[in-house]
Amino acid sequence: MLASILQIGEDHAAEHLNRTILVTAAKDTASTRWAAEIIALLERTVRITIDTDVVTRPHLELIVGGVKHRSHCRRLYAEIDAARATIGFEATVRGRGEAPALFAATAACTVAAATLSALIDDPALPTVKFPLTLDFAHLGIPATALEREINFTGSVLIGAGAVAHGFLRALRNVHARGILPIVDPKAVGEGVLNRCLYLTPDDVGLNKAEVLAARAQPDFPQLQITSAVETFTSFTKRNGPTATAIVTVDSRRARRSIQSELPGRVLDASTTDVRGVVVHSNLQPNPHACLSCIYRHVADEHAREQSIADGLGIPLETVKSGFISKDVAVMIARRHSQINPEAITGMAFDSLFRQLCAEQALATPEGRQVLAPFAFVSSLAGNLLVIELLRCAAGLSNTNYWSVDPWGAPKRQTRILRRRVPECEFCSRPEVDEVAKELWGAGDRWW
Ligand SMILES: [Zn+2]
């Protein structure tokens, strides 16, 4: 399967869908700000214009807030107030109050999903049921808890990919202080620019952790963002146990290795191509599911690694190492001439697989490829991760797993408490609970 995917002769740079959206936003501050959030999520995937003079025929007009439409094309209306956001094909009336910035940012992801669904008529995409309403009560955090100051000293952000970008962009909307290191051993690949919103094309080839820290820092006057170009395992060896691990890495295997370092708390978010977002959290000593329970080794994972190995023509053991080294990149490029070895050096095998699959799954009507997951999926994961963090900080988190459909509105009913998996490679070991108790004792001593 992968071999056929690799026949795609496209450059790995992010492609724009050849469609145009006219965005018309009301002049009030809330609508203007919200429109800017929505545009940021869409503009690296489709053409956006706010000017009717430039484009004669947009494919869709997105109307944000109570304002009159400006075109005769298909129209989508988005409205937000203190309690909810609504997106539909008919205008709605705004209720009372202004949404907190974090809720508006989360709702921007929902609007982006609805907009892309209305714009792209592709059976490969999940369907959106219109009108779509995101009731903020489902986010499970009262607006007052968003005012709490969070001290990140002792926390580590692991992974500097799309979800980490989404996390930091969401974190702009709360009060963060202290020191937060970003740990990632890899370099920026070409295919991530449409969803790593802090990056520019000049950043390709630079260290992911360093460039994200540098680009995000101006958004955080009270928080010092540092970087470490290494794995979490080597970071832990140098710095000792981590109180809070904020996990945004690509692979199941990497997640299990992070859990085995026994952080005091884990906050984790992942995406499954464009179809799913999952948030998990745990606090040691932890009687419930751990990160290794949630992302336990499955047969499917082995099959996936095997198919990556077969497709790329490299040994299975090399794929298991996680990252594409310079030598392996050259080996892959020798077999697949359309691949530029420099562009994939330092990339995770999982990321390459994800990218190549996404490129095939989402062909535009013109036959061009567009990269997925879209920015809004990883941004939603980042927003929900910040919400989970605030819920933990406020002592509101009595569940440890939240699976959300990015093409619908997050629903509180899908939050559950998952139990330990008896054969878990980490928490089934008898010494784990003892060490956790010794290390992290009574539990919640930070924040
Ligand atoms: Zn476990």
Image (tube, helix red, strand yellow):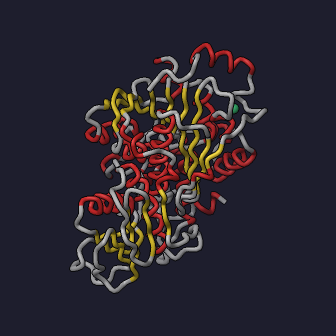
The answer to whether residue 254 is left or right of residue 157 is right
Q: Find the residue positioned furthest to the bottom.
A: 72
The answer to whether residue 433 is left or right of residue 281 is right
Q: Nearer the viewer, residue 244 or 360?
A: 244
Residue 442: x %, y % from top left: 58, 18
Q: Is residue 315 above or below residue 34?
A: above
Residue 89: x %, y % from top left: 44, 77
Q: Find the residue positioned furthest to the top.
A: 438
Q: Residue at x 23, y 74 (%)?
A: 51
Q: Nearer the viewer, residue 92 or 270?
A: 92
Q: Residue at x 45, y 29 (%)?
A: 156
The answer to whether residue 125 is left or right of residue 105 is right
- Asked where in the image residue 222 lies, by quadrant, the reply is top left
Q: Is residue 367 above or below residue 9?
A: below
Q: Residue at x 53, y 63 (%)?
A: 407
Task: Give the position of the N terminus as an image quadrant.
Answer: bottom right
Q: Quadrant of ligand 1?
A: top right
Residue 405: x %, y % from top left: 57, 58
Q: Find the residue positioned furthest to the right.
A: 422
Q: Is residue 186 in sight in this rendering? A: yes
Q: Nearer the viewer, residue 376 or 33?
A: 33
Residue 279: x %, y % from top left: 56, 44
